[in-house]
Amino acid sequence: MTTIISVRIIQMAITIVTLIPGCCFGQTAPTRRNNASIAYDPVKKVVLVYGGSAHTRGAIPMRDSAIWEWNGITWNKRTIAPSLRADHGFAYDIKNQRILIAGGAFSYNATKSIEYDDTWAFQNQQWSKVTSNKILKRFHGAFTYAQNQNSFILFSGYTPETNELLKGVWALSRNNWIHINTQNEPPARFLNSVFYDPKNDAIILIGGADLDNKPFHEMWMLKENKWTVLNENVPALIMNSHGATAMGETGNYVIVHSSFDTNTCETWIWDGAQKSWKKVKGPHPRPRNNTSIVYDDARKCVVMFGGETGVNSTNEVWELPGGQSGWIKRF
């Protein structure tokens, strides 16, 4: 009798562990996922990965709320975030040496979800809610950290409260969200990317879609509070739900267009000096949706993580070296 009871207790404990959001005991790498957030920590010289969805079409929620570090060889778990979420803001604040998380949503299933309007910081091995006014609940917004401006930048997104797309630029400065008035502002959108260009001290916006899922194909630059169009026809670019963008070396911008729906995976690089696009030849990962990429400045390569490959998501890591001879699988 004692043995039977003990076995049942163990079975119950295992069941409880698998149901606790954020449980990731015994893991040595991030779980398979798509739509993860990715950032680069120049202090520790590692790539950071957090959040996402286990499977978009299956609406399977994530159970891994850890923030993971990739050093080019192995994964390391840095900390457990306060909550599970996807489609959120995620960046590394270089000046204050802290990780920032804002907004996003968590889906319990295909019909039930919770949206967030909070902002969190991980600093000195502790999490704390940033003392600031809240942003409007949103997901599929675009966030980046502007180093020279020491600001966490937010543009666009979708809010379920009013079922509309958002526009406008917001900056988290001194732990307070401030609306930035800009000229010639792009139309409202979601599923777009923004990233910081340190060479030009500018914010770059690429792609996105409207509420009818009609894609925007242009690339914008925000400099000194004024928007200008850099390019009106980004190659192979559809909604950013099927691709990813990142700041590359020496002012170049990298776009990965990957979709298992159309069985394509392409990489394009924008040459800022020549103002032209170059298609990368060589090996590529298998097609996937909702992948994530970031530039690793220490190792001079673009790092790709995760994505939805059809039946399942993946936790593969691929890298594109500075020589652009093709992608190399690392994990």
Image (spheres, rainbow, N blue to C red):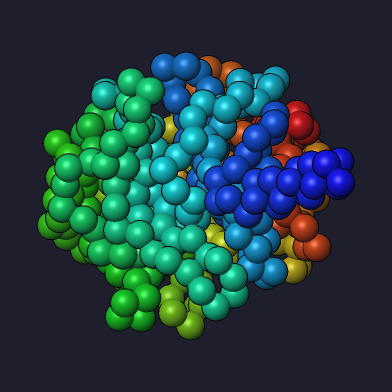
| Residue for point 69% across, 31% down | 26
Residue found 38% across the figure and 23% down from its top: 125
Q: Position of residue 147 (x, y in %)?
A: 29, 30
Total labels: the figure holds: 0
Up-down relation of residue 90 to residue 133 (above or below)? above
Q: Is residue 296 visible?
A: no
Image quarter of residue 109: bottom right
Choose top left, top right, bottom left or bottom right for residue 82.
top left
- Closer to the camera in the image, 26 or 86: 26
The correct choice, above or below, for 206 with respect to 6 in the image is below
Front one among 205 and 329: 329
Across and down, in percent, residue 211 comes to 44, 79
Q: Quadrant of the C terminus?
A: top right
Write the residue at 58% across / 50% down.
20
The residue sitting at the front extreme is 1
> Can residue 2 be seen?
yes
Q: Position of residue 107 (x, y in %)?
A: 53, 65
Left or right placement of residue 3 versus residue 274 in this view: right
- Could you say which is closer to the camera, residue 271 or residue 116? 116
Image coordinates of residue 252 in percent, x first then y, are: 49, 36
Residue at 39% in and 49% down: 89
